[in-house]
Amino acid sequence: MDLSVDLNGLKLKNPITVASGTFGFAREYSEFIDLNDLGAISVKGLTLKPRIGNDAPRVAETPMGMLNCVGLQNPGVYKFIEEELPFLKEYDTKIIANINGNTIEEYEEITEIISNTEVDSIELNISCPNVKCGGMAFGTDPLMVSEVVRKVRNKTKKHLIVKLSPNVKNITEIALAAEIAGADCISMINTISGMKIDIKTMKPLLGNISGGLSGPAVKPVAVKMIYDTYKMIKIPILGMGGISSEKDVIEFILAGAKAVAIGTANFTNPYITKEILENLKKYLQENNLTSLNSIWGKAHY
Ligand SMILES: Cc1cc2nc3c(=O)[nH]c(=O)nc-3n(C[C@H](O)[C@H](O)[C@H](O)COP(=O)(O)O)c2cc1C
């Protein structure tokens, strides 16, 4: 049975990866699962300088999901390279560095730094607010997307994934802008903007007032956005958003994702990736399918 997938130059042994910010730097999960079994690991979002993140509370439960406003807490790119990357490189899995900047120059700088390491791919998170544009997220305007992706592309020969925010009017035109500017692959979706109000205090519950919704509640939105984007672009899609079973994975592949990432589901079940992989193999066997690639995008025909 062939589970391997090629994300336009990034070759994964299987299509199961983990989503940035939900798997830390993988140390915690290495106690539960064999990291060698994963197709790839996308690490916690990295910034140039360390970040302490937003005020607490940073997470809230919602029906069928969660809200978070972690605010990109991370030790910074240099500490990642020094302390986390050597541990990750002990495993036979691809390492995706999720990167974030406040300005285009910051994206360029962090790209140059991370390109000189052994990471296998760079995932550009363009949901970050652009400080020079009054906080408007990079990923909400096709022109801004073109500019940041083109400039980052010029700084690296590494495999480049552009991660899209669903908080936009038309995600397909953002995907197209990223493809034309030189992205090798699109990952989608990031969290959906949301909030919760505490009815006792009568105030917003999260320290940051609003946050990003993830988990099963966002799955139908992700499936639709992937379905629409698949028709518009030629580069592959790494799909995510509420996946918590092999059935969800199959739905994403049918919609047009070539590989998938498991995010929030890791919090409720740290064994989830292993279980999904095993069940996926069973599904293929039971349905006499030799590969997942054979059902890729099938919902379109
Ligand atoms: C606590 C938390 C932190 C996250 N941090 C990041 C991040 O640093 N960079 C990023 O690109 N996405 C981040 N995400 C978004 C996830 O990678 C993923 O795109 C999203 O949660 C949808 O997938 P899911 O519903 O399976 O969790 C974060 C999500 C959660 C829940």
Image (cartoon, rainbow, N blue to C red):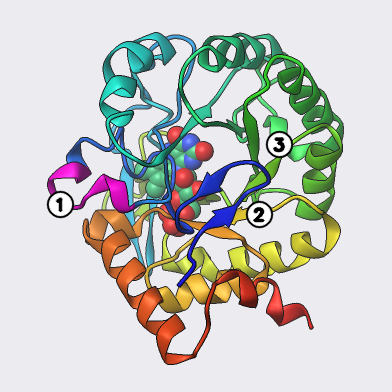
- Residue shown at 47% from the left, 68% from the top: 217
Q: Nearer the viewer, residue 123 or 37?
A: 37
Q: Position of residue 17 (x, y in %)?
A: 43, 51
Q: Position of residue 152 (x, y in %)?
A: 71, 20
* Residue corresponding to mark 2: 237
Q: CA distance from mark 2 to mark 1?
A: 28 Å
Asked whether residue 92 is drawn in magenta, I would say no
Q: Which quadrant of the render holds ligand 1? A: top left
The mark that comes first in sequence, 2 or 1, is 1
Q: Nearer the viewer, residue 125 or 300?
A: 300
Q: CA distance from mark 2 to mark 3?
A: 16 Å
- Answer yes or no: is residue 210 visible: no
Tag count in the figure? 3
Classify mark 2: residues with Cα within 10 Å, few (<14), some (14-19) or many (20+).
many
Asked whether residue 30 is drawn in magenta, I would say yes
Q: Nearer the viewer, mark 1 or mark 3?
A: 1
Classify mark 3: residues with Cα within 10 Å, few (<14), some (14-19) or many (20+).
many
| Residue type marked 3 | Gly
* Residue corresponding to mark 3: 139
Can you tell which mark lies on residue 32?
Answer: 1
* Vertical position of residue 298 compared to residue 262: above or below: below
Q: CA distance from mark 1 to mark 3?
A: 35 Å
Magenta-tinted stretch:
29-37
SS assignment at label 3: helix
- Residue shown at 55% from the left, 58% from the top: 259
